[in-house]
Image (spheres, helix red, strand yellow):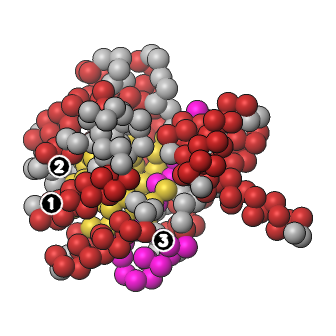
Amino acid sequence: MALLDRAIVRLLPAVPKPLVQRLSSRYIAGPSLDDAVRVVRKLNAKGKCATVDVLGEEISSADEARAIAGQYHDVLARIDSEQLDANVSVKLSGLGLELAPDLCRENLESVLADAAARGNFVRIDMEDSSTTDRTLQLVRELRAADHSNLGVVLQAYLRRTFDDLRGLDNVRLCKGIYVEPAAIAYREFDEVRASYVRSLEQLVAQGTYVGIATHDEHLIGEALRVVAEAGLAPDRYEFQMLLGVRPDRADELVAAGHRLRVYVPYGTQWYEYSVRRLQENPKIAGYVAADLARRVLHRSGV
């Protein structure tokens, strides 16, 4: 199956844009905030919470970075006014990290202040390894400056993660999807899994609120073991999944009493996000293609 997944990814540049949109439609809320709100409402109705992400890290000017920040203010306002169970997730590159550190910090602080005033929370997504030091430094500085409604993402496949997690009090732990050299990242499947479990155990042991972000059944099982052995209350952790990926398993976790959050991306840059996400994680490309084939066969009566 892995070979098929990679073959699908290699064909992506030749796939017509409308077909990519069809492939990704289940995994992206749509181009508008109204689309995201509609999806979050449905998730909330099924006992799931959400984190909303504005697609748009491909920016090239300060005005574009400020516009992304402005969209997050709009998202926070809608979450507040419609009383949705959701927070927001931001990428620092979209707020200007590669343009100017001061611009990025200014944009992030404005979003944090808005979220705090509304009793909401902001998650900083982790990007490729070239941003890791700057991201963690900014998170630690802002937490020290009493921005308590801030958390970060750590990627278990990076060799440095076990050291990075020390002292952090709100972490989303994922495997990691960017292609990184073996010198800084585990490349073997079992190594990544082992790093994930080791990091999760340490996060729980140090009292960190943890978002357990995975679709890997083995890791879900290990996470259930870890939280049970630690006797964690349901408000001290949550499971997290991508929109459209393993929704039935998500339903099972909710039914078993676990808090579960779904990552809901939206925006006009859906094409760039779709191609990058599928290229970075071929297994998701396989999920999407298999799902599309099932729907086509169902409609044709095969």
In the figure, 270 relative to 193: above or below?
above
**What amino acid does circle 3 point to?**
Ala
What percent of the width, then of the height, locates residue 45?
Answer: 53, 73
In the image: residue 66, left or right of residue 292: left
Identify the element where label 1 is drawn: helix
In the image: residue 124, left or right of residue 241: left
In the image: residue 105, left or right of residue 300: left
Mark 1 burial class by Cα count in 10 Å: few <14, some 14-19, many 20+: some
What percent of the width, then of the height, locates residue 10?
Answer: 63, 35
Residue identifier under label 3: 250
Question: Magenta stretch?
Answer: 248-273
Judging depth in this view, the residue of 219 and 140 nearest the camera is: 219
Residue identifier under label 2: 162
What percent of the width, then of the height, locates residue 288?
Answer: 64, 54
Tell me whether the residue at label 2 lies in contact with that at label 1, contact meaning CB atoms closer than 8 angstroms: yes
**What amino acid does circle 2 point to?**
Phe
Measured Cα–Cα span from mark 2 to mark 1: 8 Å
In the picture, the quarter occupied by the C terminus is bottom right
Q: Which quadrant of the view contains residue 136?
A: top left
Tell me whether the residue at label 1 lies in contact with that at label 3, contact meaning CB atoms closer than 8 angstroms: no
**What amino acid does circle 1 point to?**
Gln
Identify the element where label 2 is drawn: helix
Measured Cα–Cα span from mark 3 to mark 2: 27 Å
* Residue 115 tag number: none
Tell which tag, 1 or 3, sits nearer the viewer. Answer: 1
Identify the element where label 3 is drawn: helix
* Residue 202 tag number: 1
